Image: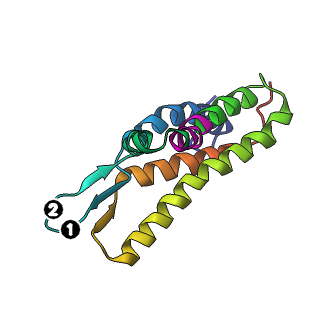
Amino acid sequence: MKITPQSPELKSFFFQMAPFALLLLFPIAWAAPLLRAGLLPIFGLEEISVLSGLAALWEKDILLALLVAFFAIVAPWLKLLGLIALQSGRAPARLARPLTALGRLAMADIFLIALYIVIAKGVGVGRLETGWGLYLLSFCILASLALSHLPPRKA
């Protein structure tokens, strides 16, 4: 049997491995710089990641930090683990709907970050640049959301 880029075996392998790849990519995205911010253009920019943001938030408001940690870190991982269980046939099909809802909640992170960027740039105080981690985090969340719409694998 010859495997080509269009073969169902290769596509099946890709979709089987994609959730595992996301399990590795998410922690990189959490540590990667989402934003670079500075008060004045003459000063250097400070890189802000999900993890550094959580650490700063932990010092100010522990309850909010726990809430953000759940939706930014725990929820995406739970969703991927549930998705792997669902796609492999180890979880009941009724788990699909809650997993999709969990993925939509994770998408709220990207919306809020984008909103903060627009507000900060509109105020005009300081300097704000997007970092490569924002794109990686967005990719991970969107890929996870897309994977949740695939039908479960046949045994």
The foreground one among 59 and 82 is 59
Q: Answer left or right for 155 relative to 114.
A: right
What residue occupies the far front of the structure in this picture?
Answer: 60
Q: Quadrant of the C terminus?
A: top right
Task: Give the total number of marks visible in the rendering.
Answer: 2
| Image: 78 above or below 46 | above
Classify mark 2: helix, strand or loop. Answer: loop
What residue occupies the far left of the structure in this picture?
Answer: 42
Q: Which mark is residue 8?
A: none
Residue at (37, 76) in percent of width and height: 123
Residue 47, image x, y percentages: 29, 51
| Labels 2 and 1 touching (C-beta < 8 A) | yes
The foreground one among 92 and 51 is 51
Residue at (53, 59) in percent of width and height: 112
Magenta: main secondary structure: helix
Q: Which residue is mark 1?
A: 40
Report the magenta residues as a range.
64-75
